[in-house]
Amino acid sequence: MLKLDEIQKRLLKEVADLHTVPEGAYNIRSNSKSVGRQSSANIEITSKTDVSGLEIRIKPGTKNESVHIPVVMTESGLKEVVYNDFYIGDDCDVVIVAGCGIDNCGNQDSQHDGIHRFFVGKNSKVKYVEKHYGSGDGSGKRILNPGTEVYQEEGSSVEMEMVQIKGVDDTVRTTKAELSAGAKLVVRERLMTHGNQNAVSKYEVYLNGEGSSADVVSRSVARENSYQKFDAKIIGNAPCSGHTECDSIIMDNGRILAVPGLEANDLDASLVHEAAIGKIAGEQIIKLMTLGLTEAEAEEQIINGFLS
C-alpha cells in the first residue's frame, strides 16, 4: 500500500481507520512527505507553494463524498508544521478525515503541528474527524499540537469529532470558530491521558449571527500522574444559543482543570456551561465484579463505555 511499512499501516488504521487506499480524494503524508495523493471530480487537492501544506477545494453541491488527509511519523526527532486549508462550496455534504499517528522508538522528541482552516459555504454540512495516537518504546516524546479554525457561512453545519485516547505525551489543542446566521457547530471531544502526559484543550466560539448555535462537549479520563486542562469560551454576539460541557473521570494522581467562559453581548444570547469531575463510583465497580470481572477489568469496562 503506497510503499508503507507495517508500522505506518498500523498508524493509518488507528488515526483514519484505513486498511487500504481510500475511495475518493486523499493525501497521505508520511515523515514529512506525501506518499500518495488523489483528487476527484469534485474535490481538488494541491500543495501550497509558500509553506508546507495543502489546499483542498470542494465544489458547490458536492454530496456524499469524503477526503482523507492522515499523517504518520516514524522517525525520531522529526518536527514539522503543516498548514491545510479547506474551501467548501455552498450546498455540500462531505466528510473530512484527518489525524496524526506518531511511533517514536528513539530518544529525540517527535512533533507534528497541524493547522487546519475550514471555510464552509452557505447551507453546507461537514463532518470532520480528527484522531491522534502515539506509540513506540523510545524515551523521546510524541507531541501533537493541532490548531483548528472554522468559518461558517449562513445555514451551514459542522460536526467535529476530536479523539485522543493513547500515547500522546504533550498536546495543546486550539479551536476557534466564527458562525454566521443559522449556522450550527457540534464538537465532541474524547480524551485520555496517562503517565506524565499533559493535554490542554482550548475552544473559542463566536456566535455572530442570529439563530447560530454551538454545542461543545468534552469527555476525558486522567490517569496516573497526567494533567488536563479544558478551557472553553463561547461568545454570543447575536440572538443565539451556546452550550459547553466538561465531563471528566479522575484516577490515581491525575489532575484536571475546567475553565468555563461565557460572554453574552446580546439580550437574546442564551449560553450554558456544565462541568463535572469525579472518580469512578465504587458501586459501579462492585456491580461489574459481581458479574465475574476483576477490579481492573471493571475499571476498563467503565472507561471504555464512558469514552465511546
Image: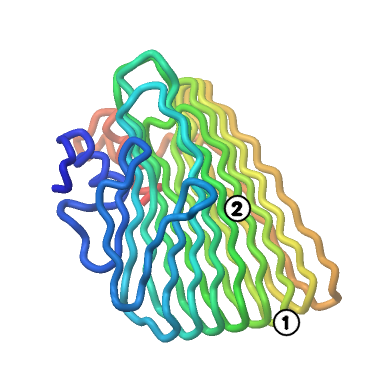
- Whether 23 is drawn above or below 123: the answer is above
Location of mark 1 (residue)? 210
Picture coordinates of residue 9, whole percent (x, y): 19, 41
- Tag 2, which secondary structure? strand
Q: Amino acid at mark 2?
A: Thr
Q: Answer with left or right where residue 2 lies relative to residue 74.
A: left
In front here: 261 or 288? 261
Which sits earlier in the primary sequence, circle 1 or circle 2?
2
Q: Amino acid at mark 1?
A: Glu
- Whether 131 is drawn above or below 76: the answer is below
Within 10 angstroms of label 2, few (less than 14), some, or many (20 or more) residues?
A: some
CA separation in Å, label 1 and label 2: 22 Å
Location of mark 2 (residue)? 175
Q: Residue at x 18, y 40 (%)?
A: 4
Q: Residue at x 36, y 72 (%)?
A: 43
User: Would you identify the image quadrant in which residue 69 lies?
Assistant: bottom left
For the question of whether residue 34 can be seen, the reply is yes
Picture coordinates of residue 293, whole percent (x, y): 22, 34
Q: Answer with left or right where residue 271 lies relative to residue 77.
A: right
Q: Residue at x 50, y 70 (%)?
A: 87
Q: Which marked residue is nearer to the observer: mark 1 or mark 2?
A: 2
Picture coordinates of residue 277, whole percent (x, y): 58, 40
Q: Answer with left or right where residue 72 lies relative to residue 61.
A: left
- Tag 1, which secondary structure? loop
- Whether 84 is drawn above or below 66: the answer is above
Q: Are marks 1 and 2 in contact (CB under 8 Å)?
A: no
Within 10 angstroms of label 1, few (less than 14), some, or many (20 or more) residues?
A: many
For the question of whether residue 285 can be seen, the reply is no
In front here: 297 or 93? 93
Picture coordinates of residue 177, whole percent (x, y): 63, 62
In front here: 224 or 165? 165
